[in-house]
Image: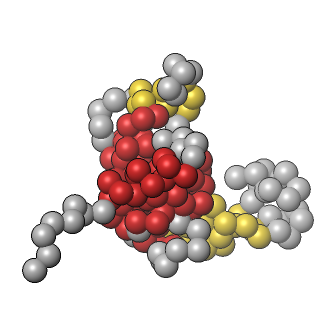
Amino acid sequence: MRCPFCGNVDTQVKDSRPAEDHVAIRRRRFCPACGGRFTTYERVQLRDLVVIKSNGRREDFDRDKLERSIRIALQKRPVEPERMDQMISGIVRRLESMGETDIPSKTIGEIVMEALARIDTVAYVRFASVYKNFQAADDFDKFVSELRPPEGPQE
């Protein structure tokens, strides 16, 4: 593993332990050349996924990009980091086990929205506002009104 500080390729593993509910291995590494310490994560990758964008463009699936968008939606929300990591790992496992290597971005967005809706309604609305490209306050109002249960006769 290349040292991120000096570029030396001869780094040493100092400590390994399970991470993210035993779906990854966290390794603490040390660079003998510069003395730098850094952490790496090793995960099982069942297959290489390709995302098909709405404009037809294809790009390699990037777990970090998925993680960033979910973290932005959950920013300042009362959701533990471990729960967030479990959700992200679950989404990736679901995508990898679909049997297809080419996955439309729309499918990924729907899966993320489904997962966020179960964890935090505010994060769900935040993610949906970007995913569904809300342009005005009316778009928010319409979307949020669909979340509310219909008001029936009250007794």
Picture residue at 36% right of the left edge, 57% below the top: 145
| Nearest the eye: 90 or 35 | 90
Residue 148 in the image: x percent, y percent?
Answer: 30, 63
Is residue 130 visible in the rendered image? The answer is: no
Residue farthest toward the left in the current orientation of the protein: 155
Please determine whether, in this image, residue 94 is positioned above or below residue 11.
above
Please state if 153 lies on the left or on the right of 100 as rendered: left
Snapshot quadrant of residue 98: top left
Q: Position of residue 15 (x, y in %)?
A: 60, 73
Q: Quadrant of residue 21?
A: bottom left
Residue located 89% across and 65% down the image: 34
Return the x and y of residue 149 as percentages of the image width and height.
24, 63
Task: Tell me what residue is drawn at x 57 percent, y 28 percent.
Answer: 59
Q: Which is more toward the observer, 50 or 114?
A: 114
Q: State the image quarter where residue 155 is shown.
A: bottom left
Foreground of the two, 125 or 39 = 125
Instruction: Tell me the residue at 83%/53% (across/down).
Output: 8
Q: Position of residue 44 (x, y in %)?
A: 44, 50
